[in-house]
């Protein structure tokens, strides 16, 4: 595995500093994974598939992607749409809340900009959020394109990442999630997401659900408790070393996914890859925000 396409949306992130001050950065679940994957395994070619605007903010993001050494050949530039945006507010008990402006973003139209088939790649990574921001027409287009890619040997990686606000109903979300699980070769599923979307109460209920599909590798993330790794023939519970001082859990799952794919890409078996992934996630939750400062080296692979 050498060439990976990661599909989704990166937004402007504004974090309230004080009544009149905001700190700006760029983040989004799949973008976070792309950045961490490239940082963990610089030898891999990581391409980001999305649409952004043609305005100054979009230029800044484009340059950031280049700085992070992501392939930008699949970044489409819209003439009339812009980046989505979200604001993070922390109340005086430390509880964070998020407000989003993303429904009109350029990324919501990405599939309309993709002409013909997607180019061949070893791995195609997407999340439930990548799917949620699209309309149904584009979701069908995506299914067709991924089916074709898969027939040409590409593996599909899917993280459920359920965000209720992006779906018209839980039923609708479940239908599409199952459609993408049915295409996935690797699933990187969070226990909380499954509890919210499917009302699964335990890891074994998640495993039962996933067994309806033919997913070769099922990785079930359960916070600080454990990671369950299931292959067609075996099942393991990988312990997670709890982090004592958690600064910000934003992007823990995204960073985990990056660590997992980086390790698998370098030939590690699924259990060793999950152990490394947990180290990467533990590192990331020791810093505020989604993306750690570039000068802080991630755990070595
Ligand atoms: P998500 O962010 O997708 O909901 P989790 O909350 O399960 O997923 O977190 C993803 C990964 O981050 C976990 O599998 C674990 O490796 C790591 N992680 C999360 N919380 C902690 C913690 N308190 N201590 C150590 N590792 C953690």
Image (cartoon, grey):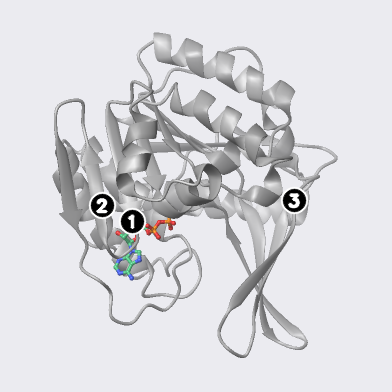
| Label 3, residues with CA under 10 Å away: few <14, some 14-19, many ≥20 | some
Total marks in image = 3
CB under 8 Å between callouts 2 and 1? yes
Q: Would residue 44 be seen by someone viewing this image from the given angle?
A: no
Mark 1 or mark 2, which is nearer the start of the sequence? 1
How far apart are the two marked residues, 2 and 1, measured between alpha carbons?
A: 6 Å
Rendered image quadrant of residue 172: top right
Residue at mark 1: C-beta within 8 A of ligand 1 = yes
Q: Is residue 122 above or below residue 290?
A: above
For the point 62% across and 36% down, which residue is it? Answer: 173
The residue that disc 2 covers is 227
Q: Is mark 2 within 8 Å of ligand 1?
A: yes
Question: Of helix, strand and loop, which one carries label 3?
Answer: loop
User: Is residue 274 shown left or right of residue 162?
Assistant: left
Q: Is residue 41 above or below residue 74?
A: below
Q: Return the residue at label 1.
A: 222
Which comes sooner in the sequence, label 3 or label 2? 3
């Amino acid at each position: 595995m050498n060439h990976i396409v990661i599909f989704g949306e990166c937004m402007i992130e504004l974090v309230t500093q004080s009544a009149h001050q905001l700190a700006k950065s760029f983040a989004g679940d799949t973008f976070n994974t792309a950045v961490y994957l490239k940082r963990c395994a610089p030898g891999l070619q990581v391409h980001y598939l999305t649409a952004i605007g043609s305005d100054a903010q979009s230029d800044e993001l484009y340059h950031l992607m280049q700085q992070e050494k992501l392939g930008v050949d699949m970044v489409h530039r819209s003439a009339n749409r812009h980046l989505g945006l979200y604001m993070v507010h922390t109340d005086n008990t430390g509880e964070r809340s998020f407000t989003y402006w993303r429904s009109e973003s350029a990324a919501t139209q990405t599939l309309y900009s993709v002409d013909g088939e997607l180019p061949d790649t070893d791995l195609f990574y997407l999340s439930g959020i990548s799917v949620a921001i699209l309309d149904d027409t584009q979701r069908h287009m995506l299914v067709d394109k991924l089916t074709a890619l898969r027939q040409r040997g590409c593996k599909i990686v899917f993280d459920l990442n359920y965000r209720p606000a992006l779906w018209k109903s839980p039923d609708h979300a479940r239908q599409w999630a199952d459609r993408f699980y049915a295409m996935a070769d690797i699933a990187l599923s969070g226990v909380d997401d499954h509890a919210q979307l499917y009302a699964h109460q335990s890891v074994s209920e998640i495993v039962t659900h996933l067994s309806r599909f033919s997913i070769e590798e099922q990785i079930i993330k359960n916070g600080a408790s454990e990671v369950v790794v299931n292959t067609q023939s075996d099942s393991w519970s990988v312990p997670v070393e709890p982090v004592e001082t958690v600064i910000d859990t934003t992007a823990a799952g995204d960073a985990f996914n990056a660590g997992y794919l980086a390790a698998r890409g370098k030939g590690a078996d699924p259990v060793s890859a999950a152990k490394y992934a947990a180290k990467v996630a533990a590192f990331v939750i020791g810093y505020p925000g989604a993306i750690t400062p570039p000068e802080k080296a991630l755990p070595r692979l």
